[in-house]
Amino acid sequence: MLIRLLIQASVGVMALAGFSACQQKKPDHAQADTAQTADTAITSCHTNPPSRFASGTSAQAMPPGKSGNRTGMVAIPAGTFLMGADNDQARPDEYPKHSVCLDGFWMDATEVTNAQFARFVKATGYITTAERKPDWEEMRKQLPPGTPKPADNLLVASSLVFSAPAQISSLADYSQWWQWVAGADWRHPEGPGSSIVGKENYPVVQVSWDDARAYANWAGKRLPTEAEWEWAARGGLRKAIYPWGNEPVDAGKPKANSWQGTFPVTNTKRDGFDQSAPVKSFIPNGYGLYDMAGNVWEWCSDYYRPDYYQTQARAGVVKNPTGPLQSVDPDEPTVPKRVQRGGSFLCNDSYCSSYRSSARMKSSPDTGLSHTGFRCVMN
């Protein structure tokens, strides 16, 4: 709905811009944890993620597929679990732990790939958010009164691209590594001159929530709820920090595509990758799901609000939650947000440890970035 960086180039300041029903009983493991405060470095990537301008164009309506195809999907069993924080890296919106009961469902084993998304675009003619010119009149509705109009050369089809700086002054200023690039979209993830040729098996990126929902509708599927995503990511493990267990991300063999070294300046690429990796590059979790930690962020269907878990905890065991009825984000009160999960190739313990199963992110539904994709589910 708006961009939080790079407008300074125009206006001199950053704009603010199988499946049995759930058993109705409480699990026999630990009670809800108490909230803890994360340090500034870790919260900076979470509380203020970069966002896009309002496109001024509602998402294209896509007719649903005749029937969902379960090829490439895995069965996720029904169950009850404690949703929320598992260690002291957790942020306030991951508390308190609360009981959630879910029916079984099917989930894509991998993130949606470039090849899969290309078939969707070919079949429908769909134009993604990043390929559309932002509309200033729509954008200004969600900006503080008196915000100057950005330069016309910024109001072009564009998206946000990660670019490693030579050095940084502060981890709190993400404009040092996020660039607003004209011509960046799902076919050109880093902008003009970049390509997905030869990367058919990589996760599609630069897709907004609107784009992801359109694809899911066409495929006869849907986006996962936040609760479904976390239950699936845990892969049958109880109270484990990561989809693979509790071993730190950089200990032992590489287990996920993340940032090794000093973020965002130096990536040692110990895991073999600088940015995104082909799907199935790392071992799956206990349910047979790949890349539920790292690689690219994944959109969920839920609206975001930081106090949602508090509401859920007061309700006891919650069955098949679908998120709050509306979004509330104190950082940007006028901008509705949707939840993202799973972390990305940019996550690092010094900055954004969001490859944890309970970690949450938020973004406006028209935002696409070079580390954001999705996967789908079916009932």
Image: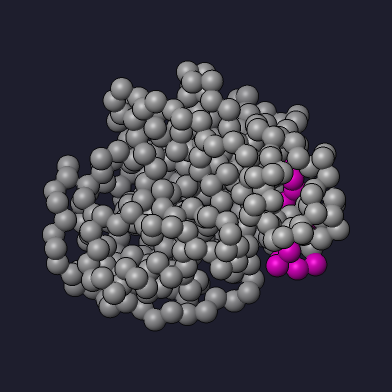
Q: Is residue 260 above or below residue 239?
A: above
Horizontal side of 145 relative to 365 (left or right) equals right
Specify whether residue 243 is painted magenta: no
Horizontal side of 162 relative to 229 (left or right) equals right
- Total numbered badges shown on the rendered structure: 0
Q: Is residue 378 above or below residue 293?
A: above
x, y percent for residue 11? 84, 55
Residue at image coords 25%, 40%: 379
x, y percent for residue 372? 56, 45
Specify whether residue 171 is painted magenta: yes
Residue that lies at the very extreme toward the top in this rendered image:
123
Q: In this view, does 86 lie above or below 268?
A: below
x, y percent for residue 317? 22, 67
Residue at image coords 67%, 48%: 139
In this picture the colour scheme is one colour
In this view, the residue in front, 56 or 95, is 56
In this view, the residue in front, 64 or 275, is 64
- Kindly tell me whether residue 251 is visible in this rendering: no
Horizontal side of 318 relative to 184 (left or right) equals left
- Please provide the residue range marked out in magenta: 169-181
Residue at image coords 63%, 67%: 44
Residue at image coords 41%, 34%: 216
x, y percent for residue 42? 60, 69
Q: Is residue 239 above or below residue 155?
A: below
Instruction: Choose top left, top right, bottom left or bottom right for residue 144.
Output: bottom right
- Kindly tell me whether residue 314 is visible in this rendering: yes
